[in-house]
Amino acid sequence: MKNILITGGAGFIGSSLALKLIDRGYSVTVLDSLSEQIHSENPEKNSPLYQRILGKVKFIKGDVSNRKDIEKSIENQDAIIHLAAETGTGQSMYEIERYNRVNVSGTALILDVLVNKKNGVKKFVLASSRAVYGEGKYQDSSAKIVFPSNRRTDLMEKGIFEMTDDKGEIIKPLPTSEDSKLHPTSFYGLTKLQQEQMVKLVCPTISVDYVILRYQNVYGVGQSLVNPYTGILSIFSSQILSGKDINIFEDGLPTRDFINIKDVTEATIRSLEMDAANNQTINIGTGIATTVKSVAENLVEGYQKDVTVSVTGNFRIGDIRHNFADIYLMKNLLHYEPKVSFSQGMQAFTQWVVKQPVLENDFEASLQEMKQKGFLKT
Ligand SMILES: NC(=O)c1ccc[n+]([C@@H]2O[C@H](COP(=O)([O-])OP(=O)(O)OC[C@H]3O[C@@H](n4cnc5c(N)ncnc54)[C@H](O)[C@@H]3O)[C@@H](O)[C@H]2O)c1
């Protein structure tokens, strides 16, 4: 395989991946709409993400929901890494049509073109998400494995955020393995699950090998600093650097599995190159749970700013409480274990952020919007 198409290749993960693939001798084509939410206004001029791939890839400005753009992009490609998507969990709860159009219909259209137009694509790598698991795997008070569904709004309004079982006992999160129950709690998660199902169904009918990668929370150098809808490290960083206190949702103790972009690009390239990954679904994470509060505190320390981190008890409908990955398959199929520790990754990230131009992040406005729609409870 030599020619690789990355949809969404001007984004955070896509641009890092493109650069690494080029280093390894691949020819990379990028199909990307340069969405303003990620790349800011006048992206050709202002987007650092776009600038880093400019002149290095064959760039096609286009939309995954436009057949002609896809037809043009797949010409002479050996493989597709499909990353283009709308990615805000909270935003997806009220921008349903848009998330459906880009994530679900866009993926359906790519598959339709692969089925109906002559092409040389042999492999399809899909960027899925931990969001397909919803709350993921837990152990209840009788040591039984359970997959709890959404938390109850009435309990969260009383400040009860942990997952509980039938007896009202707090249950323990476990590393979530790929065979866990799939029951997303957000519309975004649902679109990712639909993408997976379409890819699994269609690719075998045209003898294209697929790999589904369920990324955990990806962070690191290069992530969009202007998108207020996703990426807590960016959102917190913008707040801290503009001297604003950090107000964290719930009790600050939800956990996520933060994996550095360097590890994500390496694992993704392995999934592209290794036959052992063919037709598999693989978690890409570290297996380590980190609280949101500790992320905020580490960032404040990293930037050495005098801002306060407080917990608000506010919460968003659709947010999960805990999730961290079981990475057995990643280790055994891709022979890969994450190399960048969270503290190393945070240090590199904060050192990079302070060198970036200060761009407006409309986080406060996004919260107001969410509140107005009834998805942020205060
Ligand atoms: N970053 C994470 O933590 C994370 C976690 C789990 C899964 N993922 C998945 O990985 C993929 C890449 O995520 P990312 O963090 O790089 O996101 P990103 O927002 O930085 O990049 C997405 C790219 O897709 C482009 N795009 C959006 N709509 C498009 C459309 N209609 N047509 C063409 N291009 C379009 C955007 O302009 C952007 O460049 C997504 O599919 C996302 O769901 C990311």
Image (cartoon, rainbow, N blue to C red):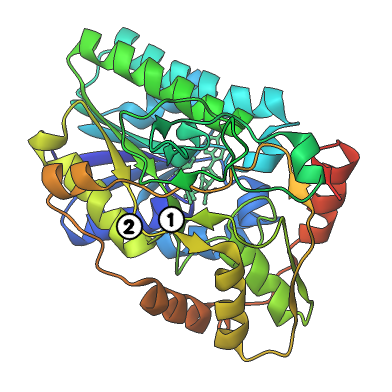
- The quarter of the picture where residue 76 lies is top left
User: Where, quadrant-wise, is the N terminus in this rendering?
Assistant: top left
- The quarter of the picture where residue 154 lies is top right
User: Seen in the image, is 212 located left or right of residue 167?
Assistant: left
Q: Is mark 2 within 8 Å of ligand 1?
A: no
Label 2 vs label 1: CA separation?
6 Å
Q: Is residue 245 above or below residue 60?
A: below
Question: Which residue appears farthest toward the right when viewing the image?
Answer: 372
> Total number of numbered labels?
2
Question: Which residue is label 1 attached to?
Answer: 257
Residue 185 lies, in percent from the top left, at: 60, 31
Query: What residue is at 43 percent from the left and 64 percent from the top?
Result: 52
Say which amino acid is labelled 2: Thr
Say which amino acid is labelled 1: Asp
The local crowd at label 1, few if under 14, some if 14 to 19, many if 20 or more residues have their Cα within 10 Å, is: many
Residue 232 lies, in percent from the top left, at: 60, 61
Question: Which residue is label 2 attached to?
Answer: 286
Residue 135 lies, in percent from the top left, at: 52, 37
